Image (cartoon, grey):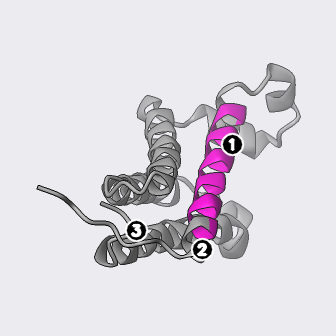
Amino acid sequence: MTVLRNKAPGWFWLVAGLITLWGVIGVAAFYMDVSMSSAAVAGMSDYDRALRASRPGWFMWVYGAAVWSGLIGGVLLLRRSVVAHPLFVLSLMLVIAMFGYVFAATDLIAVKGVVVATAFPILIALIGMGEIWFATRARRRAWIR
């Protein structure tokens, strides 16, 4: 059985490349977090050090899985694989779980303020939704199979 793919337009490759770059940035941020030196941790505010120390053990696993599934999804999008879509869904679900915990179980919003505490997590979630939308569109147009 032959599965046909439509030729993807040039802008598909641009967007897929940007999505993959976003994934690389996420993995780099994760690596910087897990490999942060004690001197760098000591340079954080008392609140930020306490917040970092209070993260449950599963938190970093969820963080790592979220960024790696996003990066692998981006790479698979460049390879025109339909498997990119479920990886983007998984990544967004993990991002929601991670930040849901942060907002529900800590006083981050009260301490930092709603804009400072939520602006970047909201941006991350919006980009995640955009990745899912884009992969869905690419699948419907047979750019990925």
Quadrant assignment, res 10: bottom right
Looking at the image, which is closer to me, 136 or 100?
Answer: 136
Of all residues shown, which one is farthest toward the top? Answer: 38
Numbered badge on residue 10 = 2
Label 1 or label 2, whichever comes before in sequence order: 2
Pointer 3 residue? 135
Q: Residues within 10 Å of mark 3 (few under 14, many from 20)?
A: many
Region of the chain picked out in magenta, as a range = 14-32
Relative horizontal placement of residue 24, taking residue 138 as reference (left or right) = right
Relative horizontal placement of residue 22, taking residue 44 as reference (left or right) = left
Answer yes or no: do the residues labelled 1 and 3 have beta carbons within 8 Å? no
Q: Quadrant of the C terminus?
A: bottom left
Q: CA distance from mark 3 to mark 2?
A: 15 Å
Relative horizontal placement of residue 106, taking residue 86 as reference (left or right) = right
- Residue at 46% x, 51% y is 79
Horizontal and vertical percent position of residue 17: 62, 59
Figure check: 24 above or below 108: above
What kind of element bears circle 2? Answer: helix
Horizontal and vertical percent position of residue 94: 40, 51
Amino acid type of the residue that numbered disc 1 sits on in the rendered structure:
Ala
- Residue at 51% x, 35% y is 60
Label 3 or label 2, whichever comes before in sequence order: 2
Figure check: 51 above or below 139: above
Q: CA distance from mark 1 to mark 3?
A: 24 Å
Q: Quadrant of the N terminus?
A: bottom left
Label 1 or label 3, whichever comes before in sequence order: 1
Magenta stretch holds residue 31: yes
Quadrant assignment, res 118: bottom right
Q: Residues within 10 Å of mark 1 (few under 14, many from 20)?
A: some
Numbered badge on residue 29 = 1
Looking at the image, which is closer to me, 71 or 125?
Answer: 71
